[in-house]
Amino acid sequence: MRDVPDLGDLVESIDLTGEALHHDPLRQITAAENLADDLHRLADRLIGHYVEQARSQGYTWTQIGAESGLSRQGVQQRHAPHVASLGLPDLARTGLFRPFSQRAVDSVDRAARHARRLRHPTLTTEHLLVGVLDDAHGIAARAVLRLGADPQRVRADLSRVIPPKAGPPPELVTVGPRARRAIDAAISQARALGQPDVGTEHLLLGVLHDPRAPAAQVLSDHGVMREAAAAAVQELISEFLRGR
């Protein structure tokens, strides 16, 4: 590929760094190692982008694996590090959030901002639920309220589960496995209900899909269970449709 830098390009980039201007060979080695690490991370994200793009367009893991002669399990294991290296902007670029309503997109964006503010490099179900509950007028927050729980108290308990970390905020917030499963479950839930958009209510049900996830446990402590939440969501949607 003509756009791939060759060794000469990389050497020149190292020689032009501040550490290398004094032509210190030891500093140049360190600069080269740092650049190699950056390139490796970028390569993971590049592969992850196209894997996610294929999945967003409806290709299954089996179809993706067949292209390289791998089983479904084999291709998932192969590409797990690549997919895990993607941040939310990367995932948005692949089309993953295309079926999301604007409220749901805003909720995910808020979740990422919460994670970055707390200096957490990985998005969890707790961040995701905080982002969802921050929208007091969304169906998710209204469903929680209908089940007798106070969304602000739930949010306060979530804040205690995810205390801030020391150090600078991360440059890229990646999506943890449980948060990703919650997002995938939200998409599946919207499809199962025959609804065109993934809303905050589906994100709530996606979080509740894994009862072992910390966010689901916090909801459970407040009396919000998956089946009851699904019923409350359906009631609210039906009420909205009748009022149109």
Image (cartoon, rainbow, N blue to C red):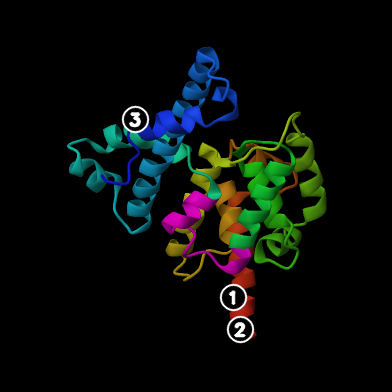
Could you say where residue 166 lies in the image, as x and y percent from the top left? 76, 28
* Magenta residues (range): 89-104
Mark 3 neighbour class, 10 Å CA radius: few under 14, some 14 to 19, many 20 or more: few
Give the residue type that dot 1 points to.
Ser
Q: Do the residues labelled 3 and 1 touch (CB within 8 Å)?
A: no
Mark 3 vs mark 1: give the one in front: 3
Residue, far top:
26
Mark 1 neighbour class, 10 Å CA radius: few under 14, some 14 to 19, many 20 or more: few
* In-front residue for pair 70/40: 40
| The stretch drawn in magenta includes residue 103 | yes
Q: Are marks 1 and 2 in contact (CB under 8 Å)?
A: yes
**Any mark on residue 46, and which?**
none
Residue that carries the numbered disc 2 in the rendered image: 242
Could you say where residue 183 lies in the image, as x and y percent from the top left? 52, 51
Q: Distance between the residues labelled 3 and 2?
A: 65 Å
Residue that carries the numbered disc 1 in the rendered image: 238
Q: In this view, does 18 lie to the left or right of 63?
A: right
Q: In this view, does 55 lie to the left or right of 137?
A: left
